[in-house]
C-alpha cells in the first residue's frame, strides 16, 4: 500500500509552546520569550514560547476566549470582583459537560483565588458562591478544608498586626458563619458565632465544616450549644 500523496495528507495543526503566568510584576510582560539550552557561545538551541500572563488580563478578556477552561483563571484578573466571579461560577455550572468536570473546574477556580496577585481577597466569597451552586462540594473536596485553615492563619496574622485576636475570629466567623446561614436560613447569633470560633480552635476548622454540612436545623443548633470536646 503506497503512502498518501501530498494532496491527500491531513493538514498539520499549528502547535506552539505557551507559558501561562499566574502572578508577577504589574508591568506588561513580553509577548514572547526564549529559553536557551545550548552551551554559552554556541549557536542558539532551545525553545521559543508565547507568554500568556493571565493575571494581567481582565475578566472580560478571559471570558471572551470561549472555553470554561479559561474561566478558572478569572480570580487572577486585575479587575476581578465578587459580582464578576458570581457570573463566572454560573457559567462553569452551565458549561461543564459532567459533574466531575464541574468539580475539577471549581477546585481549580478556588486554587487560583488563593494566589491573589492583586490583593482582591475574594476567596471566602468564592467558596460560598461555589457551595451555593454545588451543595456538598466543600466536603467532597479536601482542599477546601486547607483553605479554611489558611483563612484562619491569615486572620491570625491580621490580629497580631493589630495586637488583638479579633482578626483571626473574624476570618473564621465570615467563612463558617456564612455556611451556617446557608444551612439554617439565618445568621448565627453572637453566642453561636462564639461557639463556631471556639470549636474551630479546639477541634480544627475541618471538623466544624463537616458538622455544618452534616447536621440539619435544630441538630446543628444543639451541637453548637453543647460543651466542646476537643478531638
Image (tube, rainbow, N blue to C red):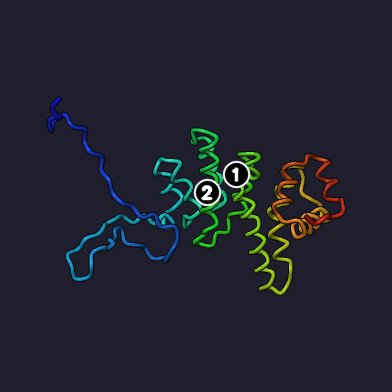
Kindly state the secondary structure of the residue where label 1 is placed. Answer: helix
Asked whether disc 1 touches disc 2, contact meaning CB atoms under 8 Å apart, the reply is yes
The tag earlier along the polypeptide, 1 or 2, is 2
Q: How many marks?
A: 2
Which one is in front, 13 or 53? Answer: 13
Q: Which residue shows up at 47% across the image and 45% down it?
A: 71
Which residue extends farthest top? 1
In percent of width and height, residue 25 lies at 42, 66
Q: CA distance from mark 1 to mark 2?
A: 9 Å
Mark 1 crowdedness (10 Å alpha carbons): few <14, some 14-19, many ≥20: many
Kindly state the secondary structure of the residue where label 2 is placed. Answer: helix
In percent of width and height, residue 89 lies at 54, 43
Quarter the C terminus occupies: bottom right
Q: Which residue shows up at 79% across the image and 59% down it?
A: 198
Quarter the N terminus occupies: top left
- Drawn side of residue 132 relative to residue 184, left or right: left
- Drawn side of residue 32 relative to residue 114, left or right: left
In percent of width and height, residue 24 lies at 43, 64
Q: Any mark on residue 122, and which?
A: none
Which one is in front, 17 or 190? Answer: 17
In percent of width and height, residue 162 lies at 69, 73
The residue tagged 1 is 130
Q: Which residue shows up at 54% across the image and 54% down it?
A: 113
Mark 2 crowdedness (10 Å alpha carbons): few <14, some 14-19, many ≥20: many
In this rendering, the answer to whether 193 lies above or below 140 is below
Quarter holding residue 20: bottom left
- Drawn side of residue 188 relative to residue 82, left or right: right
The residue tagged 2 is 109
Which residue extends farthest front? 1
Amino acid at each position: 500500500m503506497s503512502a498518501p500523496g501530498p494532496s491527500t495528507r491531513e493538514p498539520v495543526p499549528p502547535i506552539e509552546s505557551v507559558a501561562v503566568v499566574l502572578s508577577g510584576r504589574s508591568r506588561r510582560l513580553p509577548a514572547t520569550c526564549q529559553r536557551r539550552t545550548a552551551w554559552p557561545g554556541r549557536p542558539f538551541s532551545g525553545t521559543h514560547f508565547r507568554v500568556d500572563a493571565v493575571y494581567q488580563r481582565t475578566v472580560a478578556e478571559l471570558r471572551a476566549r470561549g472555553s470554561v477552561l479559561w474561566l478558572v483563571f478569572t480570580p487572577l484578573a486585575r479587575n476581578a470582583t465578587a459580582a464578576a466571579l458570581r457570573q463566572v461560577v454560573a457559567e462553569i455550572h452551565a458549561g461543564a459537560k459532567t459533574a466531575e468536570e464541574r468539580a475539577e473546574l471549581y477546585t481549580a477556580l478556588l486554587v487560583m483565588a488563593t494566589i491573589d496577585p492583586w490583593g482582591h481577597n475574594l476567596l471566602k466569597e468564592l467558596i460560598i458562591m461555589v457551595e451555593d451552586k454545588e451543595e456538598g462540594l466543600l466536603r467532597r473536596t479536601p482542599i477546601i478544608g486547607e483553605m479554611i485553615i489558611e483563612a484562619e492563619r491569615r486572620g491570625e496574622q491580621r490580629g497580631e498586626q493589630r495586637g488583638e485576636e479579633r482578626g483571626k475570629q473574624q476570618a473564621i466567623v465570615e467563612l463558617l458563619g456564612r455556611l451556617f446561614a446557608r444551612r439554617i436560613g439565618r445568621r448565627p447569633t453572637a453566642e453561636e458565632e462564639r461557639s463556631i470560633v471556639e470549636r474551630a480552635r479546639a477541634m480544627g476548622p475541618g471538623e466544624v465544616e463537616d458538622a455544618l454540612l452534616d447536621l440539619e436545623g435544630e441538630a446543628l443548633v444543639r451541637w453548637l450549644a453543647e460543651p466542646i470536646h476537643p478531638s
